[in-house]
Amino acid sequence: MKTVFIGGGHGCKAVLELVFQRRLAVLSPEIIGVVDPDPEAPGMVLAREHDLPTYSSVREALALPGLKLVIEVTGIDEVREEIVRLVPDRVRVMDHDMARVFWDLDEMAKDLREELNRKTVLEAVIREDRRRLQELLDSLPDAVMVLDNEGRIERVNRKFEEVTELPWPEVRGLFCRDMARGRDIDCGAEDCPRRRVLETGRALTVVQQHSCIRAACTSGDCYYQITATPVLKDRVVITSREVTEQIRLALETEELARRARQILTAVHGIITISDLDGRYQFANPSAQRFFGISADAFIGKSTTEILPPDVAVLFEDNDRALLEKGSRMTSKETFHLGGHESVLITERILLRDYKEELVGICRVSRNVTESMQLQEEIVESEKHAAVGKLAAGVAHELNNPLTGILTFSESLLDDTPEDSPVREDLEVIVRETFRCRQIVRDLLDFSRQARSNPQVLSMVPVVKKAVQLVNKQAAFQDIDFVLELDDDASVRADFNQLQQVILNLVINARDAMDGRGMLTVRARNDRDRRRVVVDVSDEGCGIAPENIDKIFEPFYSTKGQRGNGLGLAAVRSIMEQNKGAIAVQSTPGEGSIFTISLPAVSSTSS
């Protein structure tokens, strides 16, 4: 059959090779031409090598005499359609899809021959692999069975035979449920490892209290680790190992860890743990509350990342000292956190792992801030009580003789003529006696011997009355008073005691300014704190920082001969008696601000 090939590409070359090799038994074409516009196309080159005519024009080839068959191997649908339109009648057309069948069939035959050879070799390999697989299974310490798609046993290992005491021939073909301990396991249940693996296609390891492979349980509570692994598309390998002792140890460890967590959570001590790089691994709730940091913010962070620089330096220095010392260490840590001074007694312990290698630091701290403050307050209170008791006794003992001295001195002074040389001496006696009596009164005030009459009163008249008592005196003639008073500043206290407090603070301010400057008194209601606050400000010499903590102590004075050191002590005593407080801010050379505060009450309260 005279045939023309149109398309000289690789497809053409492949079909031509089948023809030349006489591998197309059903088709023995007489090739009268090969057509392609590219003379160097693979099919065109092969045709010329076999002395076949080649053409570049399709029309020319289709006009060849005796043409019966056109084989289109260009792979281009448009070319095929053009050939169908131009081909003469009675000439058949085989397109590239049909032409491909030839080499596909040939390739298939060749592949089958090769497959047969490979199969022969493969069977030998499979037999060897099965032998090696069985040896591998027999070497495993766990009992193993291989199940087919129905759950029947295809293969087991030597450990399986030992555990079940059943030889391989007796278990071949049995269902896996026949091997379950007690044979009461439902292999269709949702917790069946084989079923779950077949549903998910993923390996599964579970620990359960029954074994998928029959085993003798030596105690009433046994555990088994079951591993199910999918192989091929419907086979499952089941392994079983008794892990009762491991589970018991794990449960005991978990229970110990749970108790440790309960203890660490419940204790009031501040407990933190960090690694050797200083990054926190644990912080109990007490530590989180004390530092105001959540657990998430603690874990994985270093001290410098979560605490103020000065606090971080203190903690890191103590950690470094512990590492250098190599044993536990107790230290007192005083620092400011959140605007307040805090004091911790911290015990540091080195943590080691099971190899005795150092892995971290544990800190157990007690917050002793309040207890130390309370202790200081108790000491201060006892000191004031002792001084007050002494002052009261001294005052009472001195009061009667002073009254007698003053009475007789004034009587002598009245009887002494104006021009008498002793009159000046008597006046000194009277003046100094009055000064002594004032000291006695201050002692009595300080010792709280005066009777108190607390009532609801506004600070406005208290301040105004105190200022009126002094602003007409010659010592205050160069003092400019500035009053800023809140009408709603009401407290429950004794009027005379509060007046004495304001007078003492005003007199101190005058002395600090040497009787010249601006003196400001502010009274306001701090509603957020529910306190009435009174500030007495001066422009005086100020107080040296080293003296701030001493000025409220009895008999301590910075005025020299002008003071007896009881004024501020009496003020503090009155404030404590009325549940109030006094504080001071001072800058040397610029002035001081004394602040008293008392619980606020409604002006309508009775």
Image (tube, rainbow, N blue to C red):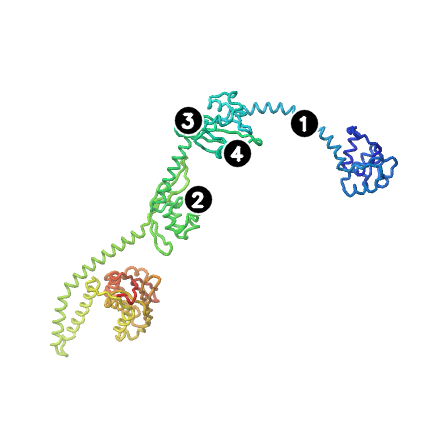
Amino acid under disc 4: Val
Which of 174/461 is in front? Answer: 174
Q: Which mark is residue 197?
A: 4
Alpha-carbon span between mark 3 and mark 2: 48 Å
Q: Are marks 1 and 2 in contact (CB under 8 Å)?
A: no
**Residue at image mark 3:** 217
Q: Is residue 230 visible?
A: yes
Q: Nearer the viewer, mark 4 or mark 2?
A: 4
Q: Residues within 10 Å of mark 3 (few under 14, many from 20)?
A: some
Say if mark 4 contacts mark 2, CB within 8 Å.
no
What is the spatial separation of the Cα atoms under label 3 and label 1, in whole angstroms? 51 Å
Task: Pinpoint residue 156: horizontal percent, then vertical percent.
Answer: 52, 24
Which label lies toward us, 1 or 2? Answer: 1
Helix, strand or loop status at disc 2: loop
Crowding around mark 2 (Cα neighbors within 10 Å: few <14, some 14 to 19, many 20+) is: few
Determine the CA span between mark 4 and mark 2: 44 Å
Residues at discs 3 and 1 in contact (Cβ within 8 Å): no
Name the residue carrying label 2: 277
Q: Nearer the viewer, residue 98 or 35?
A: 98
Tell which circle, 4 or 2, labels the residue nearer the N-terminal end.
4
Q: Nearer the viewer, mark 4 or mark 1?
A: 4
**Could you tell me which quadrant the C terminus lies in?**
bottom left
